[in-house]
Amino acid sequence: MAEVVSFAYKPDDYESEKASNSYLMSLIAVMVGLPLPIVNLLATVFFYLNNRKGTFFVRWHCTQALLSQLMVLAMNSTGLYWTLSIIFGDNSVSNTYIAYLITIVIFNIGEFFVTIYAAVNTRKGKHVHLWFFGPLTDQICKS
C-alpha cells in the first residue's frame, strides 16, 4: 500500500517535520471528530493551505495527505448518510449495508496505519509513495 521511493533531493529536518505533520494532522483530527467525517478533511485542508507555498517535498506530502483524506471523507460520508437514512428514513439494514460498514472499518483501520507509517518515514526524510495517491500526487504536484 505504501512504499519508500527516492526523491530528487534529501530534505532537511525542517522539511521532514513539516511533511510528517501533514499526515499527523489527520490522525489528531480522528481523535477529535471520529463520528464526523469532515473534521479530518478540514484539519488537513487547513494544514495544506498553510503550507502550499512551502518546499516541493512539503507541498507534495501535504497534497498526498489531502487526497487520502478526500477518499476517507467520501467513504465515511456515504456510510454516515446510509446509517442516518436507516435510523430516520425508510431504509432497512441489509447485507449490502453490513458489508459496506465492514469495508469502511477495514479501510479506516488500514488508512490509519498507513498514515502512521507515512508520518514516521517522512519524518526520517524518506519519500513515501502511497499506492493510489502517490501517482495522482505526482500528476498534481509538478516541481
Image (cartoon, rainbow, N blue to C red):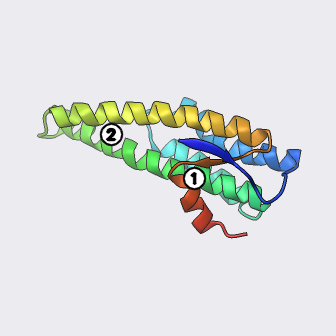
* Residue 29 in sight here: no
Q: From this view, report whether residue 96 is shown above or below residue 65.
A: above
Answer whether labels 2 and 1 touch (C-beta < 8 Å).
no
Determine whether, in the image, residue 88 is placed left or right of residue 15: left
Among the two numbered marks 2 and 1 on one chain, the one whose residue lies closer to the N terminus: 1
Q: Quadrant of the C terminus?
A: bottom right
* Residue type for callout 2: Leu
Where residue 98 appears, as percent x and y from the top left, is 23, 30
Residue at position x 72%, y 38% in the image: 121
Residue 84 showing in the rendered view: yes
Question: In which quarter of the view is residue 55 placed?
Answer: bottom right
Q: Residue furthest bottom?
A: 142
The kind of residue tagged 1 is Leu
Where residue 99 appears, x then y in whole percent?
A: 25, 33
- Secondary element at image label 1: helix
Q: CA distance from mark 2 to mark 1?
A: 20 Å
Q: Residue at x 45, y 45 (%)?
A: 72
* Residue 29 x %, y %: 58, 37
Which residue bears the numbered disc 1?
Answer: 66
Q: In the image, which disc is placed on residue 80? A: 2
